[in-house]
Image (cartoon, coloured by chain):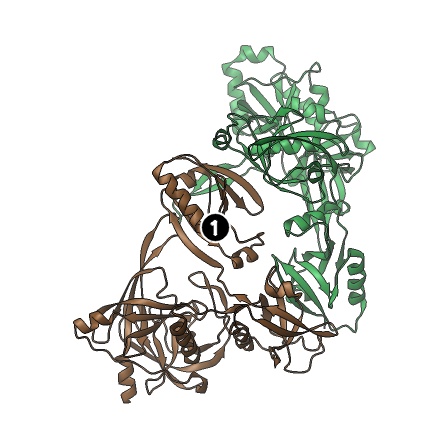
Amino acid sequence: MKFRLLFFAAFLLAPAALRAAADLPALWAERVKCVVSVEYVTETETERRPTISMGTVIDAHGTIIIPSGAIDPRAATWQLKDFKLYLPGDAASSPAEYLGQDAFSGWHFVRAGETTRAKLTPVTVFTGQGTSPVPALAEFVWGIGLRNKDEDFAPYIMQSHVALIQSLPQRTAIAQHEVAGPGLPVFNRDGVLIGIAATSFGQSFLQFSRRNRGDPVLLVNVEESSAFMLAEEILPNLGRIPKHVSGRPLAWLGAYGLEPMDRDVAKFLKLEAQSGAVVSEVLEGSPAEKAGLKDRDIILALDGKPLPSLKPERVVVTWLEREIDRRVPGDTVALTVLRGSARVELKAVLGEEPKLLREADRKYYDRLGFTAREFVYGDAIERRVKAAEPSGVVAHSVKPSSPAAIAGLRQDDWIKEIDGAEATSFTLVAAKLAEIETDQARAEFVLLVSRSGETAVLRIKLR
Amino acid sequence: MKRGFKQLLESVVKIDVREVAFEAGTKRFTGGIGSGVILSADGLVLTNAHVASPRAVEINVTLANLERVSAKLVGWDHWTDLALLRIDLVEVKRRSLKFSHADLGESGKLFPGQEVFAVGTPHGLTRTVTRGIISNNNRYFEDTRGVNGYETGAFNTWLQTDAAINPGNSGGPLVTNDGKVIGISSRTYLGANNLGFAIPSSTAQRVVAGMLREGGGITRSYIGIVPKELQDLENFYSLALNTGMLINSVEPGSPAAKAGLRSGDILLTLNGASIDGRFPEQLPPIQNLIANQPVGASLKLTVKRGTETRDYAVVTEKLESRVGEEWALEKWGLSVRKVSRAYARENQLDDASGVVVIGVQPGFPAAAAGVSRGDIITKINDQLVLSLDVIKAAQAAYETKPEPTLFEVQRNRRVSLYILKP
């Protein structure tokens, strides 16, 4: 209600300026057709967890992008089910298909069913004459928000002015107030697309209560965002629709724990204004290792181009990681690194990313009360063991009050032995656990698990 | 009242300690009070390790006749939470002070239900006697951070009593009605009523003798196994009753790991002596048996793995605490603690080099650069931080000529560089 009044007041105060531009409600009515709500279910063995997020239609085939945070990276792709679309203000849903995630842009892609496509308008229709205008500072911008499911995802308008434009490393505008739902488009006064709202940034508040005198708390608005990525960052990447739901191929360098180098360090190392990223560890068997990259090398340039100076410094690392994600396995990258006081030139041929958590095999055992998951490369890194010798399985989830939970098994425990026999491969373990699960005469079994470097023997009583 | 009890009362002292603390990125002094009991005519006082520690800069003992005299730390063992002080005898003689001393009793003969008394200084209330019974004479209680961050309880069981024990009772004696010291009151359960714990005199006797023999600490052996009681698992491992102890974990890089022992192994004998670790309270004596072996000795462990039983030779190392030596680098506003072998193992570090940041002072160079608590400093300028001396020397150089200094810091598995600026 508040902004509707303001809107009304604006008409009274500046009639000349607004009459020249197109009628905002009319622009809004057209553009509302390029936003949807996407609902899907993460189906695990013990529960079905619904998630709702907002998305923007990007082409005539009914392809929709939703923000990267909309899907839990722990969930296996095949656990994501029942994708549905809701048009703004419409309680009826229609089926949709999940296409996968693009590593570079981070977006998840979803496609509307045949029947719904006709009702959608791609946001690209509103891009102007092939150019993507960059909003000026203080320029008026507006966008669309969607209410919750109980209000049939009713659309509403938000308006603001551009306060700041930054490279994070994507060119991002920050408006004074919330301007659109995360994942939804932002337009200028003429109705030309100028960006898509990112996940909202947190804002610090002081919380006062009877006991606490002003404790700082960080609040994040999950329904509306004041930050949006500029159209110039978005339009070139709309074609990155994954060919496969796994999102593969995925480029991999294997330089772990990149840490930014601050200005003082650069000056100390006589690099002056140069940006850099410290490589904490070179992962074994990785393309980086094959290229001769060493722990604690400082990456200064990629393909001969110095790393950009970006603020905050952490963004330089994101920039570098995105540059790898942008490429495909088989591409060659040239790295210039500082090792001690010497500059070293390296060439790395990017490889294919090892199996990800979301791709790991997993199986649930109801009587035992836990899901066993294949041990993947990322597990080895997290547990600081050599990835070349992965063995065992991981307790992916443990059902509360189940025999496994009572015996003390916890999520992410690394199961190394079952009944004294080494758990060498997932297939072997799965067969063994299935055998225990079905053997009704079984009274107990014993697991050897490792948790943060310490092992323990757990006795799981089944009867 | 028995004569022995009166003598005991005249042997109990109040202990005031002023000690240095490094945690805040600077040296600070803190104070504390506790209790103690005089054990000999030449002024040995037994108390808790958490009352008087090597960080103490000033120790004062208040005798039964309310005279105050200074004392020095002569022995410290956090594993059993015991410390030994010596009263300044020169001062005693000069001021013609008198004190009595108490005798140790036999804690092994105690039975649950037996009447005992705790004497000490709860909350600073000097010369307080409380009464209770032995609630349990063989309690297992282990705490990896129990004595001001140091490990305790691995090598002894405890006496449990319902005699009121409060803060300040620490280090005071638990005695029978004839005044014999059968325990040193040490700890209680927070939030519980009448659950007090004391170190048995049998342990105290052994530790005091060791401190006097070795001139300070107690040298123990370490092989790197984390034991667990076998209770309920005998069938699984097909063991005869009252045989064996479960090796729950083998610390990476430890002598046991090098010898090839693995988690889930069952220890059957040690140097030929059979091992029975069915219940938790049986574990400390077994741990103590290992600890009492000479450092560098080769132990023969008979171990059952699956159906196979075989011997392993394990060469012992000197036992170390996870808490390393501490220091404050005041110009940088930085407190550090040497990474110990135990800390490195616990945190899966490659080796024991580096120092852990235990505190930073806001507004000082370390905090301004972004160094924070828990970071491990591995390199300063071009020098690897292999000892505390390296960082002390760097700070000394900085004090004479303040110049930007490069720190390489590890946080989890990530490496960052920071410049500490004057």
Read off the residue under disc 1. Answer: B356
Q: Which chain is green?
A: A
- The hue of chain B in the figure is brown
| Residue A436 falls in image quadrant | bottom right
Say which amino acid is labelled 1: Val
Q: Which residue occupies 58% across, 77% down?
A: B279
Q: Which residue occupies 47% across, 81% down?
A: B137
Output the chain of dot 1: B
Is the C terminus of chain A in the top left, top right, bottom left or bottom right quadrant? bottom right
> Badge 1: how crowded within 10 Å, few (<14), some, or many (20+)?
many
- From the viewer's side, name the closer residue of B2 and B387: B387
- From the viewer's side, name the closer residue of A398 and A191: A398
Q: Which residue occupies 63% across, 14% down?
A: A22
Q: Is residue A411 left or right of residue A211?
A: right
> Residue A147 location in percent, x, y?
62, 35
> Residue A462 location in percent, x, y?
72, 70
| Residue B197 falls in image quadrant | bottom left
